[in-house]
Amino acid sequence: MKIGYYPGCALHGSSNDYEQSLRACLGRLDVELAEIQDWICCGATAAHSLNHKLSQALPARNLALAEQQSLDELLAPCPLCSMQLLKVSADIKDTDARAELSAIVELPLEGRTRVLNLIEIFQKVGLDTLASAVTTKQESIQAACYYGCLLTRPPQIVTFDDPEEPQSMETVLKALGIKTVDWNFKTECCGAGMTMADEDTVLELCHRILENAQAHGANCLVVACPMCHVNLDMKQPAVSRRHGTSPMPVYYLSDLAGLALGLAPEELGINRHFMEATWPA
Amino acid sequence: MARIGVFLCWCGENIARTVDVARVAELSAQIPGVRCALDYKYMCSDPGQSLLREKIVSERLDRVVVASCSPHMHLKTFRKAAERAGINPYLVEMANIREHCSWVHPDREQATLKAAELVRMSVEKVRHNEPLRPIKVPVTRRALVIGAGVAGIQAALDIADGGYEVVLVEREPSIGGKMAGLSETFPTLDCSQCILTPRMVEVGQHPRIKLYTFSEVEAVDGFIGNFTITIRNKARYVDIAKCTGCGECWNVCPLKKNPSEFDYGMGFRRAIYVPFPQAVPARPVIDNKVCAKLVRNGCGLCEKKCPTGAISFKDEDRLIEEKVGAIVVATGYKLYSIGKEQPSDKLHGYGEYGYGKYKDVIDSLQFERLLSASGPTSGEVRRPSDGAVPKNIVFVACVGSRDNAKGLSYCSKICCMYTAKHAMLYKHKVHDGQAHVFYMDIRSGGKGYDEFVRRAIEQDGARYYRSRVSKITQENGKLMVRGADTLSGLPVTVEADLVVLAAAMRPADGVQELARKLNVGYDEFGFLMESHPKLRPVETNTGGVFICGACHSPKDIPESVAQASAAASKVQLTFASEELTREPEIAGVNERMCAACFRCMGACPYHAIERAEIHARNGDLIKRTARVNPGLCMGCGTCVAVCPSKSMDIAGFTEQEIYSMVEALA
């Protein structure tokens, strides 16, 4: 299966461990990633608060490029990117808006591309296929799936799962034979947006998430967002210092899937995380 | 030559501000056949109507056009006035020069010319009008009431006390509906059962009420005054005529742990059971999904114990036919399902509230049972998980209501009041407890209603937070209810022992299917549609079918009862004479021309067209034809549009009349 791939800034920069992980994992499932050539910024961080047109034009250009390169389905593993791309996909259902954005980006734009996140790729591969591809049973893992803010929101645009009580990551992990825990803070804010501005709040929020996951019996956190990972993994030593939180590894969804599919932690880039992995028993 | 009179109304300033009415009168007077054209400031007023009558007589008019407001407003008025002066009322036409002209156009010159055109069209139509006579249909003076909650009970008793027979159909094994399960009612806190059960007994004993419980309306045929109803009497496995309600059967039934529907799963019942002690009829029913005898031919103890031989495991559904002249629908409501499983993609539920996941998150009807003396805890407030008395209780309003993103856009109207009542009754039972209420707005319009809410806050100390709850989670045995207090601007977290969700009201299950059987419209939420929101609130667009209670929209008890009495009085109005008069503007077939293709039958939304045969005197078949049942036809004209041989026409709106109007424009 060939799928278009929009890495965005994170997966080529601070979270290139995520890219390594999902390339290795999806490779095992015969998913070929075709990176959009000449892709540009999705506009997630600053554009939408500065200039509405710009925040539409940036993702629109990426969608137009995907169309030009005949990529009908596009994986955007970062929820900020996928939200931007989905937002403009909805906007260009209106023909006038589409014509205007097409003129701005100087490329034809039809709105053919379907934007998917990592969970949806697993769903597309099929839960039965996943189950049958498992080679290494991960029995000691008790995963707390953490969705964060944007993976399932805003509900008008992101519709693949319930925004407040999502279950799709659990379903994928269960298909892979990995146990998940029922816990309370799946969609609470991790504070990533405030990392620079207000560290106290961020540490407090991260602490609450980690503590609640542990209180419900989890021995690791699973995320599908580079921002969540940076915050909960890289900041965790600071969280522990401030609040006395016990350490806990934070995995990408593709990390655990990759392990179940028989990949080594190094192949998935898990050794590059800040928090040390503590498995398998 | 026709002698047509044109009467133009100023409607005070409403028309005269933009239309030069006097000039329209001048122009109208020049149309051939128009004997006189007059304008007047208020044509609908008494002097205006007198003017019309006088002119009819003095000018020997035989047809009239009134140019004024919408015919919805005053067509009846002017037809009556003309009739008094001796003209067939269907020879009166109206030209709407207000809504269709003066109100929507700013330019005086153009509006005046348009008004003149509108008048000319109406003159051409009235020239071709034929005198018509209202249709008479005989009436079966007997009513069907569907649903025996408080609304259905009220309607049935009112009609029966008025002297007419009532067939009352209830789906559940007992009448009483939702109200029978409530604790105390706002704003007076009288006990719900104490006020309802005497009415239930009255229904059970009324000589003119024929009660079918555990029954549903299977099919509806016919039309106003002449309905034939098929009722499915579901197998009860107990002959209620033989049964004395002694209780031997349910006392021996070994299957004790079936969740009770009446207690909303908070209590248990046997496989053979009476839903609640005050049930009417006080006769048991066997649950055929759990009874050991019916499921696997086991047990059978109840049959052996029954002293009157009333139990029969061979019982089957029976279909019963009843003839009635009018129908009252009072099917009531159910609560929005709060968990994730939703009947429609549009309703996303509130998985984050943990309903169905945490035992101590319940809905408001379940809490009513906890408060009720007849409930599973005999009226003590004890939480379901461990039976402890909750010391901190949270009430969440608007769960599913007023939420376009996840729920329903409408306000369920009664939740503010019953939530205040819950907070109050809780405090009356748990003196050292604290009630917390999360609300969006407090909507407490009604007699004594706002005072009641203030009492809950000021005397019973309920803490109100203007806040939506974002999430309910369980931590260390406590339910953590979190939200943001939008008045103080601060986040709130309440550690609760019990949470009560005030779920939105939705129409009862199956009401859409019933509405289709009755040809009654319903809105996007499934609530039944009234004929006019202000002036015909209990009528529907199908003659002889009335609605009352929460099947129409969320309502409290006083409103449901008031509407039920209104529906009952409309039924009695329908029964006031032995014959009904209907407007004659219905379809008719030119039977000589009809090609008997019967395309009209498929198109007719009211099933008003039937196949007929024309026979010669010796009995030979001459031809087949479509024929319109004048009792059923609503005059919509769909058949006229589909008829390929042009042999359908609507009286009062014939093709000739319509085309003459169009030609007048050319």
Image (tube, coloured by chain):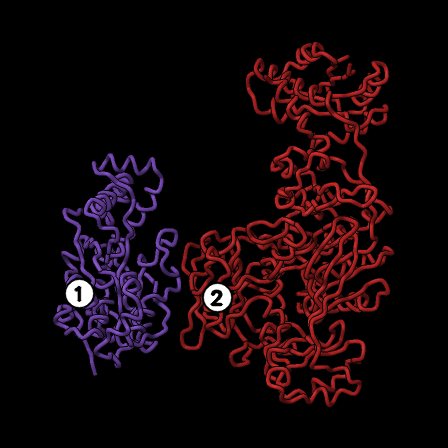
Which residue, given by chain and number where applicable, does mark 1 sit on? A27
Looking at the colours in the rendered structure, which chain would you say is drawn in red? B
Which residue, given by chain and number where applicable, does mark 2 sit on? B339
Image vertical order of residue B330 relative to residue B249, above or below: above
The hue in which chain A appears in the rendered picture of the protein: purple
SS of the residue at dot 2? loop
Q: Amino acid at mark 2?
A: Gly
Image vertical order of residue B520 relative to residue B589, above or below: below
SS of the residue at dot 1? helix
Can residue B537 be seen here? The reply is no
Image location of residue A47, percent across then percent down: 24, 44
Evaluate whether label 1 is on the same chain as label 2. Answer: no
Q: Is residue A19 left or right of residue A53?
A: left
**Quarter assignment of residue A130:** bottom left
Image location of residue A272, percent across then percent down: 13, 68
Q: Amino acid at mark 1?
A: Gly
Query: Where, quadrant-wise, is the C terminus of chain B in this rendering?
Result: top right
Of residue B392 and residue B42, the one placed in the foreground of this image is B42
Image location of residue A234, percent across then percent down: 18, 65
**Quarter assignment of residue B639:** top right
Image location of residue B604, percent across then percent down: 64, 44
Residue at screen point 64% across, 89% down: B299
**Quarter assignment of residue B651:** top right
Residue at screen point 17% across, 50% down: A36
